Image (cartoon, rainbow, N blue to C red):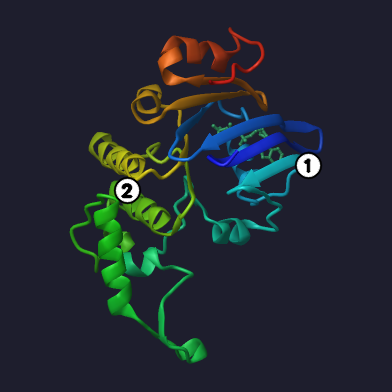
Amino acid sequence: MSDIVLKTENLTKRYGGVHALEGANFELRKGEHVAIMGDNGAGKSTFVRQITAVEQRTSGQIWFDGKEVNFAGPIEARTAGIETVFQNLALADDLDVPSNLFLGREKVLFNLGPFSILDRKYMRKATEAALVRTAVKIPNLSNTIRHMSGGQRQCVAIARTATFASKLIIMDEPTAALGVQETAQVENIIRTLKDNGEPLILISHNMRQVFDLCDRIVVFRRGRIVANLRKENTDGQDIVSYITGAKTGEAELAA
Ligand SMILES: Nc1ncnc2c1ncn2[C@@H]1O[C@H](COP(=O)(O)OP(=O)(O)OP(=O)(O)O)[C@@H](O)[C@H]1O
């Protein structure tokens, strides 16, 4: 149990009569990168929303970092060490890179309420360190987000996640809207996270990406986990069979 970062048992979410997530049993171990795949509406985002307490689950249990957790909301989950990069990036367009990295957790030099003075020097240095650690290349930290490309914005969002996530990073389709080069840059960051031993859950529709970056693939279909396979024990065709329902059956538990 000690090397398990996250575990869910019978995690279930219903929206009225919609069974969005049914009895999900899931485990993530230290340093592991796990992909979550599945068709549109399969329950992937719902699963993440229960873990991050963006919504409250209907039933089931969650253990994180060695203890059972019942986060009241996303801030509690974030404080506990779960950081998420969502499809909509939640960046502030008119602020520069350090301000975005520290958004909502600004380092204050003198606390004078609304007139507080921020420690900009500290935030800039910490941002530079975070970008080195995550291998993110941003040409000019003083640029506002508005003046950056989609890929650069995504890199800032990921760097922010990696800076504060002490325990678990979740990315929901981080490259869905990016071009080839930008996708490659984000994938490099993910490899750096792997090298640093940081565990990751990656929701992705991109088979090549999943096989490149992840150790294990979990497939959701109609709210249920239908496969849980180490990548060396499966291939793209096999995964597609589970996604489409051509192959069914109990989830195979990876050894
Ligand atoms: N707030 C909600 N109210 C009602 N039904 C919902 C709600 N959110 C999600 N659902 C339904 O729950 C099911 C699972 O949706 P979810 O967004 O988790 O799928 P997904 O696998 O993340 O899909 P996608 O790849 O399209 O993002 C779908 O049938 C969806 O319509």
- The residue to which callout 2 is attached is 150
Residue 233 is labelled as: none
Crowd around label 1: few <14 · some 14–19 · many ≥20 (10 Å):
few
Residue at 24% from the left image edge and 56% from the top image edge: 132
The alpha-carbon separation of the residues under discs 2 and 1 comes to 36 Å
SS class of the residue under badge 2?
Answer: helix
Q: Position of residue 209 (x, y in %)?
A: 36, 28
Determine whether, in the image, residue 31 is placed left or right of residue 2.
left
**Front one among 30 and 149:** 30
Determine whether, in the image, residue 122 is placed left or right of residue 6.
left
Up-down relation of residue 231 to residue 144 (above or below): above
- The residue to which callout 1 is attached is 58
Residue 127: name its quadrant: bottom left
Residue 246: name its quadrant: top right
**Residue lying furthest right in this view?**
17
Up-down relation of residue 159 to residue 51 (above or below): below
Q: Position of residue 240 (x, y in %)?
A: 49, 14
**Residue lying furthest top in this view?**
246
Q: Position of residue 117 (x, y in %)?
A: 39, 87
Determine whether, in the image, residue 237 is placed left or right of residue 245.
left
